[in-house]
Amino acid sequence: PRHATAAMTKPRFGMEVFKFSVYIAMPIIMVSVFVWEPENLEGIIKQCAYVVYPPEGPKPPSQDEMRKIIEANRKKRLD
């Protein structure tokens, strides 16, 4: 029983070196892919565009136009 726990807790330096190298290499690879080929990043952004904004609607009236509308509504109510 004692040998089994010792084997399970023995450090595995090969695996740790591999995991560390992947941890260091992955950001470097991703930056190089997207910096040297910006089309890759644009393609991913277009492919994953999940936010679709509606077309721009009409602009709200300005203050002067709002005053004119309010005055016209007041005159209609008084008549």
Image (spheres, rainbow, N blue to C red):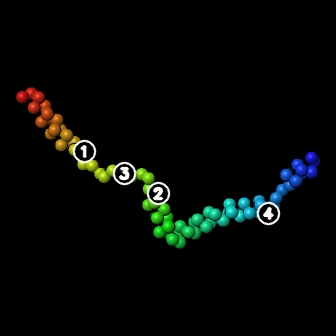
Above or below residue 79? Residue 57 is below
User: Which label lies toward us, 3 or 1?
Assistant: 3
Q: Which residue position is annotated with label 4? A: 14
Label 3: element kind: loop
Q: Nearer the viewer, residue 8 or 57?
A: 8
Q: Which mark is residue 48?
A: 2
Would you call the spot at circle 2 few (<14 residues within 10 Å), some (14-19), or many (20 or more)? few
User: Which label lies toward us, 2 or 1?
Assistant: 2
Label 3 vs 2, first from the N-terminus? 2
Query: Which image quadrant for residue 20?
Result: bottom right
Disc 4 to disc 3, how far (Cα)? 50 Å
Residue type at tag 1: Pro
Label 4 vs 1, first from the N-terminus? 4
Q: Residue at x 79, y 63 (%)?
A: 14
Disc 3 to disc 1, how far (Cα)? 19 Å
Above or below residue 36? Residue 45 is above
Q: Which residue position is annotated with label 1? A: 60
User: Which label lies toward us, 4 or 1?
Assistant: 4
Q: Residue at x 11, y 28 (%)?
A: 77
Q: Which mark is residue 53?
A: 3
Image check: 38 left or right of 12? left
Q: Residue at x 46, y 64 (%)?
A: 42
Label 2: element kind: loop
